[in-house]
Image: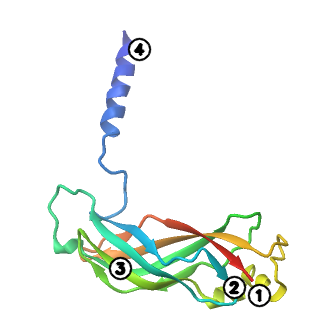
Amino acid sequence: MTRKATVLTLLVLASVLGCRGRTDKSEGTVILSVSRFDGLPSVVSATNGPFIIGTININNVPKDPTGTTSNLQTVELRSYEVRYTRRDTGRRVPPTLVGGIFGSIPVSSQTTLNNLPFLMSNQTQTPPLSDLIHNGADSETGTSIIVLDATITFFGRTLAGDDIASAPSTFTIEVRP
């Protein structure tokens, strides 16, 4: 009987703890969410940077959509970061891009950023991308195409003082000579 009671107790606790509306554990009462990319190139030439995202929409979503909201939940955008990982067999990646951005997004609203750089010209001047420019191939893998996942995260702060970061959004690009 004790074993059944223990199992029943564990099941009740699991169901109660598993019923959270959101699993987000970030600071504050809002979430930054990237809702759309447009004008994103899938293939770029390492010699033609900087490379941009035509438009990107970012939403400011209340964590509790049924709760009350206020102007203090407005997010002031501060910066963004793009990290790169290789999809091919190589291990070298361009340096992380960190850029400043300005603007504010009221709660339950969105903003559109235009022509946001995701890979700068100075990043193409370092390995492995500089290998494509100078040698026509990646010296690590011997290939003339480097496939990268670019993961972008946006950072801001609510007017109430809570630091907010978006969930990372990832897209894939092929870099050629």
Look at the numbered discs 1 and 2 and tell me whether their residues touch, using CB distance below 8 Å: yes
Q: Is residue 73 left or right of residue 52?
A: left
Q: Which mark is residue 3?
A: 4
Label 1 vs label 2: CA separation? Answer: 6 Å
Residue at 52% x, 76% y is 40
Q: Identify residue for label 1.
A: 133
Residue at 37% x, 55% y is 24
Using the rendered view, name the quadrant where residue 87 is placed.
Answer: bottom right
Q: Amino acid at mark 3?
A: Thr
Q: Amino acid at mark 2?
A: Ala
Work out which residue is located at the far top of the displayed protein and give it: 1
Using the rendered view, name the quadrant where residue 46 is placed.
Answer: bottom right
User: Which comes before the other along the chain, label 4 or label 3?
Assistant: 4
Q: Under tag 3, what secondary structure? A: strand
User: Which comes before the other along the chain, label 1 or label 4?
Assistant: 4
User: Which comes before the other along the chain, label 1 or label 3?
Assistant: 3
| Display colour scheme | rainbow
Q: Identify residue for label 3.
A: 112
Can you give x and y, in whole percent of width and height, for residue 92 in the image?
73, 72
Q: Under tag 1, what secondary structure? A: helix
151 or 114: nearer the eye?
A: 114
Q: Residues within 10 Å of mark 3 (few under 14, many from 20)?
A: some
Q: Under tag 2, what secondary structure? A: loop
User: Which comes before the other along the chain, label 2 or label 3?
Assistant: 2
Q: Residues within 10 Å of mark 2 (few under 14, many from 20)?
A: many
Q: Identify residue for label 2.
A: 46
User: Which comes before the other along the chain, label 4 or label 2?
Assistant: 4
Q: Under tag 4, what secondary structure? A: helix
Residue at 33% x, 51% y is 22
Label 4 vs label 3: CA separation? Answer: 56 Å
